[in-house]
Image: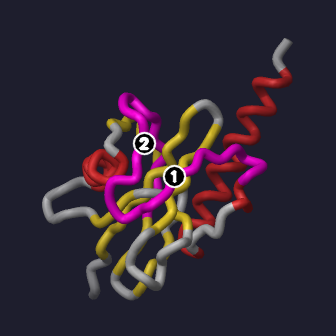
């Protein structure tokens, strides 16, 4: 039996928007967009890994993590799991592995070239954001 390495992705949310990060490396992924995150280290929970990765990659503190249902194979032996995360402090900056960040509203989901593995989680999160915005707009 092979143990799968977990890679965490953060669907960072703020004011009804999702943060997208454009990869700068490796060359095969450069220019494509993803949910920021990275590998879970030995002895680390996925949630702690995500908080650490968001701090290292974006310079922010995040919390209020909620798992997005599903997991997606990245390559043999690696699986992606995604959590929504709320910004607690800091303004996101592309510090590692990215050269640009962009906040997207649900209707802007297709304006960037998402990595294939991130597309299902992004679609779920954007659908939830759109539903939340619709519910808020329907209130008197």
Q: Residue furthest front?
A: 99
Q: Identify residue for label 1.
A: 101
The residue positioned 45% from the left and 61% from the top of the image is 99
Horizontal and vertical percent position of residue 71: 49, 67
Judging depth in this view, the residue of 3 and 112 nearest the camera is: 112
The residue positioned 32% from the left and 59% from the top of the image is 96
On whether residue 76 falls in the magenta region, the answer is no
- Whether residue 61 is situated above or below residue 51 in the rendered picture: above
Q: Identify residue for label 2.
A: 92
The residue positioned 54% from the left and 48% from the top of the image is 19
**Residue 46 found in image quarter:** bottom left
In which quadrant of the rendered image does the C terminus lie?
top right
- Whether residue 70 is situated above or below residue 134 in the rendered picture: below
Of labels 1 and 2, earlier in sequence is 2
Horizontal and vertical percent position of residue 23: 46, 68
CB under 8 Å between discs 1 and 2: yes
On whether residue 92 falls in the magenta region, the answer is yes
């Amino acid at each position: 039996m092979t143990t799968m390495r977990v890679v965490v992705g953060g669907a960072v949310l703020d004011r009804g928007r999702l943060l997208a990060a454009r990869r700068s490396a490796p060359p095969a992924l450069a220019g494509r967009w993803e949910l920021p995150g990275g590998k879970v280290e030995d002895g680390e929970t996925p949630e702690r890994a995500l908080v650490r990765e968001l701090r290292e990659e974006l310079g922010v503190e995040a919390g209020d993590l909620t798992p997005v249902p599903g997991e997606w194979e990245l390559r043999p032996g690696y699986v992606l799991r995604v959590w929504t995360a709320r910004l607690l402090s800091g303004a996101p900056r592309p510090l590692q592995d990215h050269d640009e960040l962009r906040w997207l509203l649900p209707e802007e989901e297709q304006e960037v070239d998402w990595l294939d593995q991130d597309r299902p989680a992004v679609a779920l999160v954007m659908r939830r954001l759109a539903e939340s915005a619709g519910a808020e707009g329907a209130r008197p």
